[in-house]
Amino acid sequence: MIDFDRAKEKVVALHNLQTTSSCDGLQICPETNTINFIEMKGFEEFKRNNQVSDKTVKKQTKKFDFEKKLEQSYFLLQTILSSSNFCAAKEDYKNFQSVQKRYFIVTDLKLEQNGIENILLSLNFLAETSNIDAMIETCLQEKVNDINVCFLTQKPRLVSCEKICELVCEREEIA
């Protein structure tokens, strides 16, 4: 696992780039031929420090530009591969194009496992809810569903911290 924010700082300085954002982490899994872009979003602290409501959750999640972070992270990764300091062969760069690329948005919330309940939450959006985590999950999932990036080989996924370890190294079968 690579702290991609720190890697970004070094790449930006070395190549004098204007990029402003990156994913929090990058994981390269040679055994599964995958590259996982990982973005972390914590909400436990947000819930402690804010009067949580439909309005504050929507305002907070509206700030997230997952697609921009992902695209700029991919650009940074390509910059690293094509850099003379990295010494990648043309064959390595060609192989990079065929590697599975996935995006995980990881949260410290315990995410619901019931798909029907999530659909209900999306439709109703719980005017006044007793389940703040479900409301936050619904807002986050809507943002994740809007991500449309052509280089990914799998739809972006919203996952809990508890599940990320088992998901990042699973092999995806592409039809």
Image (cartoon, rainbow, N blue to C red):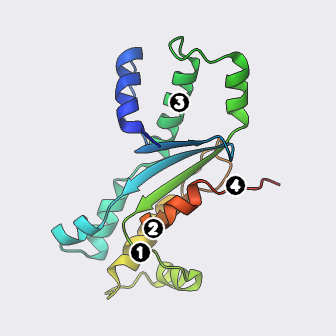
Q: Name the quadrant containing residue 78.
A: top right
At label 2, which amino acid type do we have?
Glu
Q: Which residue is mark 1?
A: 110
Q: Which residue is mark 3?
A: 77
Q: Is residue 34 visible in the rendered structure shown here? A: yes
Residue at disc 4, secondary structure:
loop
Q: Which residue is mark 2?
A: 162
Which of pointers 4 and 3 lies earlier in the amino acid sequence?
3
Q: Which residue is mark 4?
A: 171
Q: Name the quadrant containing residue 74.
A: top right
Q: Is residue 25 left or right of residue 79?
A: left
Label 4 and label 3: CA atoms lie apart by 21 Å
Which of pointers 2 and 3 lies earlier in the amino acid sequence?
3
Residue 164: x %, y % from top left: 50, 60
Picture layout, residue 73 above or below residue 16? below
Q: Is residue 21 visible in the rendered structure shown here? A: no
Name the mark nearer the viewer: 2 or 3. Answer: 2
Q: Which residue lies at the image location 18% right of the left edge and 74% below the top edge? A: 51
Q: Which residue lies at the image location 44% right of the left edge and 44% below the top edge? A: 25
Which of pointers 2 and 4 lies earlier in the amino acid sequence?
2
Q: Which residue lies at the image location 45% right of the left edge and 67% below the top edge? A: 162
